[in-house]
Amino acid sequence: MKPFSLLPALGACSLLTNAVFAWEKSANGTCTLIPHGSGRDDSQQFQEVINATECTTIVLPQPYTYSIQQRLYTDITNKNLHVYGRLLFSDDLEYWINNSWMTDFQNLLTAWILTGSNWTLSGGGFAQGGIDGNGQPWYTRAAGVVNQPGRPMSLYIFNASDSLVKDFSVVQPQFWAFFVSQSHNITLDGVLVNATNHDPAAPVPDPNAVSHGYSWVINTDGIDTYRSDSINIQNWVVQNGEDCVSFKGNSTNINVRNITCIGSRGFAVGSVGQYPDRFDNIINVSVKDVTMHPTPNVSLTGVVYFKNWIGEEIGTPPNGGGGGSGHVSNLTFENFAFQEADQPVYIQTCLTYSDIDTTNLCNTSKVLMEDVTFINFQGNSSGTYNGTLVDLNCSSSTPCRNFNFIDWSVTAPEQFEPVYDCINAENITGITCGSS
Ligand SMILES: *[C@@H]1O[C@H](CO)[C@@H](O)[C@H](O)[C@H]1NC(C)=O
Ligand SMILES: *[C@@H]1O[C@H](CO)[C@@H](O)[C@H](O)[C@H]1NC(C)=O
Ligand SMILES: *[C@@H]1O[C@H](CO)[C@@H](O)[C@H](O)[C@H]1NC(C)=O
Ligand SMILES: *[C@@H]1O[C@H](CO)[C@@H](O)[C@H](O)[C@H]1NC(C)=O
Ligand SMILES: *[C@@H]1O[C@H](CO)[C@@H](O)[C@H](O)[C@H]1NC(C)=O
Ligand SMILES: *[C@@H]1O[C@H](CO)[C@@H](O)[C@H](O)[C@H]1NC(C)=O
Ligand SMILES: *[C@@H]1O[C@H](CO)[C@@H](O)[C@H](O)[C@H]1NC(C)=O
Ligand SMILES: *[C@@H]1O[C@H](CO)[C@@H](O)[C@H](O)[C@H]1NC(C)=O
Ligand SMILES: *[C@@H]1O[C@H](CO)[C@@H](O)[C@H](O)[C@H]1NC(C)=O
Ligand SMILES: *[C@@H]1O[C@H](CO)[C@@H](O)[C@H](O)[C@H]1NC(C)=O
Ligand SMILES: *[C@@H]1O[C@H](CO)[C@@H](O)[C@H](O)[C@H]1NC(C)=O
Ligand SMILES: *[C@@H]1O[C@H](CO)[C@@H](O)[C@H](O)[C@H]1NC(C)=O
């Protein structure tokens, strides 16, 4: 890589009001952006180089760090964006709480909206370029709190199609690393997500305790899909304290391959049924070749779990809700190897985040779950839930059906008898409900 002058030798130098944008353009449409340095904000010139019509490939080379102090909106239709360096999001929490973009789900926020069709976003190699979300102050702020508002997702892929995220990393995401919504035919290949708490004030788990807790990295999902079709997620490594991969309403034809989840809550189907006016379909999902294990500080709480809201509306989203309907169907989870999962497979059927006791509403859930197949599961549970390996706890108003377990080799710690609970669950094959 040749050295870069502070002002570009070739091509575009845009002078806008009082800002100087520094990128170098070569004849083939490749524009190379260098950071301002000295702690100055690069968000404006980053969006400017992306907007420049003469730039079809935008390169942010290593070893540069780009300071992102303002929310980003980028439409990279027909462009290639190579973030070989890193985009370091600022830790001005108040700015982000006040100014992050709103998404179309649960009033959740994002720091960066990426949109458009026929684009590539790449980081140049596995665990190389990408985003540093500067998540630590967000983790410390949210310590011990569920669903704290104001935290922005690192990257919101919205209204996008026919595009590729390749070899890209998100370290220390502020909140969820990726959220893909209203998009189709997106492949995300070779992604590292790592949310690790470094605040020494976090309680250190007892190494002998069966469950390691979350160690403050709550709500750091690897990726969530919503209102999207034909999404391919492959060759990922996710270390976090929340869902590794999560499928939300109207996720259809989702293919997931070769994923390692470290810590994490595993694969989440849902939540579904939170919005009475939004029917939630999760249909044709295939997940294959997954390895999972806890860390000394963060439990692997589950392998595959389902989150269904209660069938009555109590409060309003984001943290209240319920009463929605949905259909979860044709999901296959194949070749899973895992260690010490607190509860490998379970269904939550009376989900609410309100303070109201909803146990009497567990039988009201209206989401139909059917045709779910688990093939070749090999692993063990931690014993946190004694011997429970599977808990299919469905609602009487909408029983679940056709859950099939094939080549199931999952063990409980030896002091416990394995337990398979099935409530309002019909045609469950390959495990023996109610016993070992
Ligand atoms: C475009 O030019 C740049 C700088 O000369 C070079 O590094 C890059 O490989 C070229 N890209 C293509 C696709 O030719
Ligand atoms: C880039 O273009 C979009 C429209 O596509 C516009 O909204 C935005 O303000 C532009 N950003 C910059 C930094 O020029
Ligand atoms: C996709 O973008 C590339 C440039 O990155 C362009 O050459 C190609 O024509 C575009 N394809 C379509 C279908 O627009
Ligand atoms: C955030 O919003 C509050 C209330 O509107 C305001 O007082 C504060 O100055 C804002 N801070 C930033 C950094 O935008
Ligand atoms: C979605 O993208 C299309 C172009 O593909 C555009 O016409 C439309 O306005 C976008 N919708 C939103 C909500 O941004
Ligand atoms: C899907 O997107 C990829 C880019 O990731 C593109 O090459 C392919 O042609 C698209 N498929 C369809 C059916 O448009
Ligand atoms: C995540 O980061 C932590 C600390 O920064 C490091 O110890 C760990 O190895 C990383 N995990 C992965 C999968 O890279
Ligand atoms: C699985 O993904 C990891 C991380 O991207 C990669 O290193 C490994 O080569 C992949 N394995 C296979 C069989 O493709
Ligand atoms: C899912 O799509 C259906 C139409 O197929 C629509 O009625 C429903 O509101 C959508 N749900 C969401 C969450 O967008
Ligand atoms: C189930 O989903 C798979 C993809 O995961 C798809 O190939 C298959 O056709 C679907 N089956 C039905 C009956 O739609
Ligand atoms: C585990 O078993 C013990 C003893 O029977 C019981 O007190 C405890 O509630 C059980 N824990 C769970 C999570 O079921
Ligand atoms: C029971 O479930 C299996 C697979 O999960 C399915 O093939 C079969 O058709 C189901 N039987 C009934 C009666 O629905």
Image: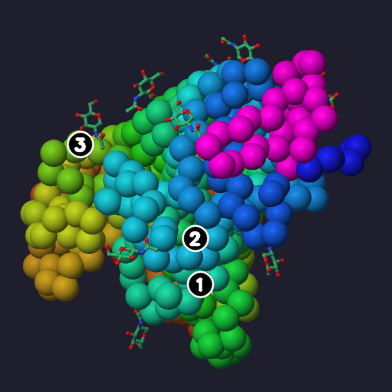
Circle 3 SS class: loop
| Residue where numbered disc 2 is placed | 174
> As displayed, is residue 174 above or below residue 368?
below
In the image, which is nearer the foreground, mark 2 or mark 3? 2
Residue hosting label 1: 137
Q: The disc labelled 2 sits on which kind of residue?
A: Gln
102 or 315: nearer the viewer: 102
Judging from the image, what secondary structure is the residue with disc 2 in? loop
Residue 327 in the image: x percent, y percent?
25, 37
Q: Residues within 10 Å of mark 3 (few under 14, many from 20)?
A: some
**Amino acid type assigned to the residue bearing label 1 in the image:** Pro
Residue placed most toward the observer, 285 or 128: 128
The answer, for residue 209, to whether it is visible in the render is no
| Figure quarter occupied by ligand 1 | top right
Nearer-N-terminus badge (3/1)? 1
Q: Is mark 2 within 8 Å of ligand 4?
A: no
The residues bearing labels 2 and 1 have C-alpha atoms spaced at a distance of 8 Å
Check disc 2: other Cα within 10 Å, few if <14, some if 14-19, many if 20+.
many
Quadrant of the rendering where the C terminus is positioned: bottom left
Mark 1: is the Cβ under 8 angstroms from ligand 4? Answer: no
- Image colouring: rainbow
